[in-house]
Amino acid sequence: MTQNTLDSSLAVVILAAGQGTRMKSSLPKVLHRIGGRPLVGHVLDTARDLAPQRVLVVVRHERDQVAEAVLGVSPEVVVVDQDEIPGTGRAVEVALDQLDGFDGDVLVLSGDVPLLDADTLAALIDAHRTAAAAATLLSAIVDDPTGYGRVIRDADGGVDRIVEQKDATAEEAAAREINAGVYVFRATELRTELARVGTANAQGEKYLTDVIGLLRGDGLTVSATVAADVAVTLGVNDRAQLADAGKRLNARTVRRWQLAGVTIQDPDTTWIDVTATLAPDVTVLPNTHIQRATTIAAGAVVGPDTSLVDCEVGEDARVTRTDATLAVIGAGATVGPFAYLRPGAVLGDGGKVGTFVEIKNSTIGADSKVPHLSYIGDTTIGERVNLGAGAITANYDDLAKHRTEIGDEVHSGSHNVFVAPVRIGDGAKTGAGAVIRKDVPAGALALSVAPQRNVEGWVEKNRPGTGAADVAARARSAQKADDGAQQEG
């Protein structure tokens, strides 16, 4: 769901101040990535889909690093610093200070709950407004509520309070309805009640959840919406949960592309970042990773065993068992198997990069071929070129990189080395085994041929007793006998 009309009565506050100690990582928890985005990036995407008037992100731990990532995803958000007072209640309170005069609804999200979708949140906001509630929370029914705050309901089934795990009695801890950490509050009541919240609890924090009990004590309506899909409410607190969330997100992403007309042969081994774009009639074969801003045009076949990072793949191209990053593959081109395209590799329409070929910072023209066992670095290749097996453009002289330029319709022999800087003119040819150190004029044949010298008897003299010496001696004897017989005849 994407809402196009601005909701001027909605502000979103995203909590991203925590350290996330259970991740056991130097990287802030909300910056761990799934699906090509940091966790908080997915929450920002969902918030943007709701078209709120304002989005605020509260930061504290590794403040600058988190703020940079947040603004990289959504430059329009307001980054708010939490002070030394701990707790989610204080985080929301400092965000409210930036919403002076706002009297609409405040949606509070956690930066470590990446699977929440806009449809679930839109339904929550609608239920909140329909009930004219002071607060509405999203809850879920789970088999094992360990670690989550419990939703405690009154005799009439209404929300009475939320109790954190460490503060729960045995009876309260047995409740299976958990708080998903997602709330909608009326801003006016939220400001009033947050001012009354203290830190007299097991963790010495200012809990946002305490607002629920205070609102109920004031006789105001507090409602809860149970999420239809528990998975969307699950937070990420450790590496195991990170992997689980990544797998769920990927399954959702793969299915979305399947329903959009993409053939994905094995969803279980195909990974597609949410930032990638695939056209209808693309085919993705098993064990393929399509990452970051990769785009794949209609009719292309990618895989198996292929990784594409920030690549462009043209219509009807075929990419097989290839590792490519920041590469452009033209329409109708073929790559692989076992090819390596490094940043700056550009393959023109109808071109070919074959088996065990590495391309780096090079442009290969339309219908040109680098079929096998080659390294092409810092090179410009024209159109309709064919490089023989084992071609190397030697671009580095131990001090600096240099470019090789190969014109149109050039055909090289096998096992050529082009020592840059060097230019091969249009239509030129090179012989097998040539080492090209000088420019080759258009239409010329370049050879670097040394006379072949055979040293008779070298193996028998220098490697006596070896198998090679033995068979060489027998062959020489047989040859002498054969020569003698011919002479007698």
Image (cartoon, helix red, strand yellow):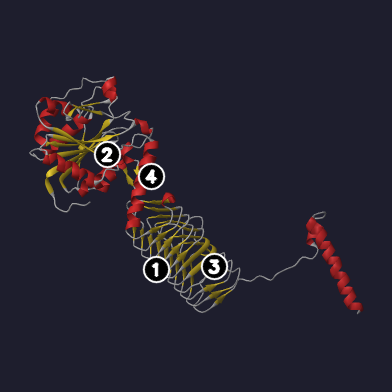
Quadrant of res 209: top left
Which residue does the numbered mark 3 point to in the structure image?
437
On the question of residue 101 being in view, the answer is: yes
Circle 4 or circle 1, nearest the eye:
4
Amino acid type of disc 2?
Gly
Q: Report if the CB atoms under discs 3 and 2 are less than 8 Å apart.
A: no
Between discs 3 and 4, the one toward the N terminus: 4
Circle 4 or circle 2, nearest the eye:
4
Which residue does the numbered mark 2 point to in the structure image?
111
Residue farthest along the right direction in this orientation: 488
Q: Position of residue 250 (x, y in %)?
A: 36, 48
**Numbered badge on residue 247:** 4
On the question of residue 35 being in view, the answer is: no
Q: Secondary structure at mark 3?
A: loop
The residue under the point 82% across, 65% down is 475
Between marks 4 and 1, how big is the CA–CA gap?
Answer: 32 Å
Q: Secondary structure at mark 2?
A: loop
Between discs 4 and 2, the one toward the N terminus: 2
Between discs 3 and 2, the one toward the N terminus: 2
